[in-house]
Amino acid sequence: MSSYPNSGGRVTVVGTLNVDHVWQVPVLPRPGETILASVVERQFGGKGANQAVAAARQGARVTLVGAVGDDADGQRYREHLAREGMEVDQIASVPGVATGTAHVYVDPRGENLIVVDRGANARIDAARLERVLAETDVLVVQLECPLAAAVGALRAAQAHGVRVVLNASPTHRDFPWGQHAIDTVIVNEHECRDCFGCGPRELWTLSDAARGALLAQRGVANVVVTQGAEPTLHLAAAGRTSVPTYRVEPRDTVGAGDMFAGALTAERAAGRDWETALWYANVAAALSTLAIGAQAAMPARVEVEAVIVRESAARVARAG
């Protein structure tokens, strides 16, 4: 069982589970180019499971709704998530189907290319969500899972009055914006433009009324935009917030976005204000880039809090 301190928030995640094959390469391959890997590792991944683990390591009580194959990888994955302290009864084992896989190529700068085979993730059943929504503070959904499952999850959450965090990644041109109430959308700069028709700078410069009208059109209350090393933005009808990132020298950026989403959700589920939650998530995401892999690199709450305390003390010292 997990030893991470409980944050008080109850989070349910609907999403994918993959076994990642991580290849460290001197450069990312170009079309038609053959590259020799220096190191190859197998790790647990998938956006849904990554975000669930990230939230659990920050102390949230987490249930994951997803699907694995009835193979050895699927069994190992369920055991791994149970050790992380989360509820795994709503992860289906699909007969005759392989657990999803991803091939991840990482260069020395931490940049990556990823190719995914959905496998059992194509069979995610959002109907399983009905069994746990009554005990959920926040539902997290990503668009890596089948669109029907994502939309079904949003529909169920709305019927039960549960707040929804949608990580609109990868973007989907057929996503039915405006048909469901979404508390928070998390996107990067490119996804922001795909989802809202304008980039973060344009959203930032809109008047509160104009921004509110645009978000209302999409059925969204809050937008969070990550911008790499640049400040993270929170945009809503009531105003806007810019929160600096925590600067590090990244070793591997795989999973950093999932770490951010999971940490932010855990903090919001626990009742933190936007500025506090965003700074916490920024630090957690930065720390996750200091090691290779997605879940393998995700920090525990105590590690994130140690950095936050140190940075707070440094700011006080500079001000004095």
Image (cartoon, grey):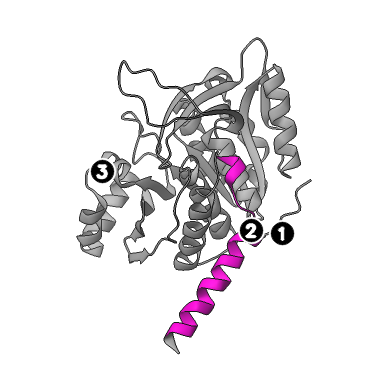
Disc 1 residue type (three-letter): Pro
Q: Earlier in the sequence, mark 2 or mark 1?
A: 1
Report which residue position mark 1 lands on.
5
How many neighbours does mark 2 have within 10 angstroms: few (below 14), some (14-19), or many (20 or more)? many
Give the magenta part as a residue range.
294-318
Where does label 3 land, which residue?
193
- State the residue at coordinates (72%, 40%): 87
Secondary structure of the residue carrying tag 3 is helix
Give the SS element for disc 2: helix
- The answer to whether mark 2 and mark 1 are in CB contact below 8 A is yes
Horizontal side of residue 95 vs 17, given as left or right: right
The amino acid beneath tag 2 is: Arg
In what element is the residue under mark 1?
loop
Query: Disc 2 to disc 1, how far (Cα)?
Result: 7 Å
Whether 307 is among the magenta residues is yes
Which three-letter amino acid code belongs to the residue tagged 3? Arg
- The dominant secondary structure in magenta is helix
The residue mark sitting in front, 2 or 1, is: 2
Q: How far, Cα to Cα, is label 2 from label 3?
A: 32 Å
Q: Residue at coordinates 55% horizontally, 22% vertically from top-left?
A: 101
Within-10-Å neighbours for mark 1: few <14, some 14–19, many 20+: some
Reading the image, the residue beneath label 2 is 301
Closer to the observer: label 1 or label 3? 1
Query: Residue 210 location in percent, x, y?
Result: 21, 58
Residue 16 spot, x, y in % from top left:
55, 30
